[in-house]
Image (cartoon, rainbow, N blue to C red):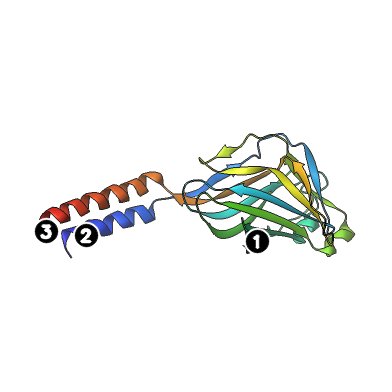
Amino acid sequence: MTGFFKVLTVLIAISTGSMIQAATLVTNLNEDFAEQITLTSSWEFTQTFTTGSSDATLQELTFIGGSGFLSTNIEYLNVKLFEGNGSYMGTFTNPANVAGMFSNQIITFSGNFSLNSNSIYSIGITVDSGADSYGAGYLNYTSSLNQNGLAGWGIGNNFLTWTVGDTTAPQDTAGALSMSLSGVVPEPSSLSLLVLGLSGMAVLRRRRVG
């Protein structure tokens, strides 16, 4: 193997192996909640978010259960991910072994979704009719626009409430669901190292050939 390809192999290994594990991509969970959404099979909810300047893998989605949130409600929740054009990407896995009340407690759903940089996605929440007999569940939302996370990431400043079976426009509520997105993104220094290294090796290779 030539010196060029040896260095190339090392650079690629460093770049692909150096990832930020379980990074908080964006969150507003520290903000005071304004109200709660009611989780019944009669309504569906949509919350958008935007990604930053690099691709990412979304692994966890966290909400805060509102007052009186029963574990039974979690079993009947369907939390899905959609692209900005509405294309379905997949469904998150609900928490396992949940017991008792989850009032004002953190509830984390898991997944493994590849997200493109500088793109819009949406979270969709529906409830199976089987949950209705146990009473309504609740999730908190905030009116605060303050968020923390990686550069360029953001949670939309409003969410939509759709009435199941109704073709009229959804209700637009100012505020955002109290939520947090976590996952992995390439470490900026590693990407820079790979780009600079490849550029430098290309120059050296051209000089040798010339």
In the structure shown, which secondary structural element does the residue marked by tag 3 occupy? Answer: helix
**To which residue does mark 1 refer?**
93
**Sequence order check, earlier mark of 1 and 3:** 1
Amino acid type at circle 2 is: Lys
Q: Residue at x 16, y 52 (%)?
A: 204
Image quadrant of residue 110? bottom right
Q: How far apart are labels 2 and 1 at the CA level?
A: 42 Å
Q: Quadrant of the C terminus?
A: bottom left
Q: CA distance from mark 2 to mark 3?
A: 18 Å
Asked if the residue under mark 3 is in contact with the one under mark 2, i.e. CB atoms within 8 Å, the reply is: no
Is 26 in front, or is 105? 26
Quadrant in which the N terminus appears:
bottom left
Residue under label 3 = 209
Compared to 127, does 37 lie above or below? above
Residue located beneath label 2 in the image = 6
66 above or below 91? Answer: above
3 w.r.t. 30: above or below: below
Q: Quadrant of residue 97?
A: bottom right
